[in-house]
Image (cartoon, helix red, strand yellow):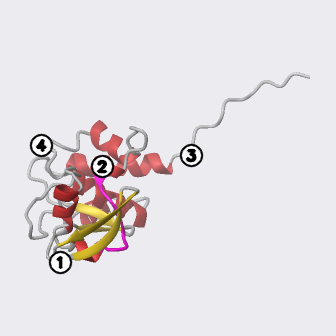
Amino acid sequence: MTHISVTVDGTTYEDDVEPRLLLVHYLRDRLGLTGTPVGCDTSNCGACTVEMDGASVKSCTVLAVQADGSEVTTVQGLARDGAWTPLQRAFHEHHALQCGYCTPGMIMAARDLLRENPHPTAEEVRAGLEGNLCRCTGYQNIVRAVLAAAEQSAAPAPAAPAQEVTA
């Protein structure tokens, strides 16, 4: 057993783990964070994508011991006080899912893409998500959702309402 300390979705966990335990299984089986699905266990599908120290990784290719000292964010750690992120809302509003199995990985990979390229073209979105597979949607609505989230993030915040000043 190897001792690890990893921060997941803002909470630090101290655990003893088998050196061969995959991060995806640590998240699901030890921490109960089942929002990260086990897809293919071969890194082909991307369903298990999470962020580790700010970069997207396929958690089926990372050992839990490799996450020691790291910050991991799962799809379950994105919403704040029950409020979805603009990207999560865009996936919902643009029907960018059908069965939903690939959705957590798509959202996490799209976050990484938008962090690196806040104003992508449709072609850049397709290229940025090429390591994540979806067997249901044909990708068009996923691309639309990512573009909508980028557009929403680029929009200026609404102005505060004018306050009447009386003398």
Mark 1 or mark 2: whose residue is earlier in sequence: 1
Find the magenta span and give its range. 67-75
Residue picked out by circle 4: 99
Q: Nearer the viewer, mark 1 or mark 2?
A: 1
The CA span between labels 4 and 3 is 34 Å
Mark 3 or mark 1: whose residue is earlier in sequence: 1
Q: Nearer the viewer, mark 4 or mark 2?
A: 2
Mark 4 or mark 2: whose residue is earlier in sequence: 2
Q: How would you rate the neighbour count of disc 1 (Cα within 10 Å): few for under 14, some for 14-19, many for 20 or more?
A: few
Image coordinates of residue 97 in percent, x first then y, are: 19, 43
**Element carrying mark 2:** helix
Q: How would you rate the neighbour count of disc 3 (Cα within 10 Å): few for under 14, some for 14-19, many for 20 or more?
A: few
The CA span between labels 3 and 2 is 27 Å
51 or 94: which is nearer to us? Answer: 51
Mark 4 or mark 3: whose residue is earlier in sequence: 4
Q: Nearer the viewer, mark 4 or mark 3?
A: 4
Residue picked out by circle 1: 19
